[in-house]
Amino acid sequence: MRGAGRRRRGIPPRARAWWGIGTAVVIVVAVAIGIGLANPASPPAAGRPAPVGTPSASASEPDAEETAPAAASDPTVEADPTDPETPALGTLAGLEAVSGFAPFDYDRDLFGQRWADVDRNGCDTRNDILGRDLLNPVFKAGTRECKVLAGDLIDPYDGTAVSFVSGQNTSVLVQIDHVVALGWAWGHGAYAWSDEQRTVFANDPENLVAASQRTNQSKSASGPADWLPAEPTLRCAYVEQWVGVLDAYDLGIGDEDRAAARAVLQTC
């Protein structure tokens, strides 16, 4: 046969055997590398590893809020006047110190007409405050919700309930109190005001609250050194409002009233 005696070209039989084994090894290694690339091991955490024995953070560790000391609950720690929760302390500290004695005798008439319609809304100040502070107020028909006939009051100084009924003998049971009394204001700077300024002050809703006859008369013209609400939980609101009025009208304050107001505000 033509060409039968020619020697076959290519890889010898033994070499072909080793070649097959090598090829199989290469395939296995390639598969292993492929698996490793598809599932890489998690890289080590960045940064310096924690020393042996150092516990790692876990959900069982207490929050910072739980471990922080509750300084506010310590009665020996005074409130910081710069704390936004106690702004009245900062206001109190900035009030001018005065003796409380005026060169002229106090006269209620110098504060203008009683319960004038300063805001000119067609309703006198007394009825404005009754309509604002009473619960379930009943107004006289035809007065555009001005004249208050009845309602219920929760006294701002002792928390008791008082029923209001307009009448010659019953209206007096609910009165309008000046938070900063006119007589007190007179000796602490109001004596130098104009008649118009005193009239505005006497009818300012920010300085007025409806109160029972009993608490209004017991308070009279006192400052915090001589009178505070009978209910302790109501003292903070009262003193904060009292200090705010002094600040708004640039009234001064004596040492005893300042100390009494500070003692209350430090508990708020």
Image: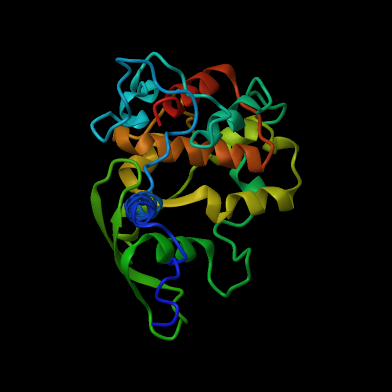
- The reply to whether residue 219 is visible in this rendering is yes
In x, y percent, where is residue 184?
Answer: 56, 33
- Left or right, residue 175 beside residue 55: right
Residue 17, picture quadrant: bottom left
Q: Quadrant of the N terminus?
A: bottom left
Q: Is residue 254 left or right of residue 238?
A: right
Count of numbered circles on the image: 0
How has the structure been colored for display?
Answer: rainbow
**Front-lying residue, 222 or 258:** 258
**Residue 167 visible in the current orientation:** no
Q: Position of residue 98 (x, y in %)?
A: 67, 22
Residue positioned 46% across, 81% down in the render: 143
Please state which of residues 97 and 203 is positioned toward the viewer in this rendering. 97
Vertically, is 46 above or below 17?
Answer: above
Q: Quadrant of the C terminus?
A: top left
Q: Closer to the camera, 45 or 187?
A: 45
Location of residue 32 in the rendering, given as x and y in whole percent from the top left corner: 34, 50
Q: Residue furthest bottom?
A: 142
Q: Residue at x 34, y 60 (%)?
A: 171
Q: Position of residue 15 (x, y in %)?
A: 38, 52
Horizontally, residue 82 falls left or right of residue 232, namely right
Residue drawn 32% across the image and 24% down it: 67
Q: Residue at x 35, y 46 (%)?
A: 156
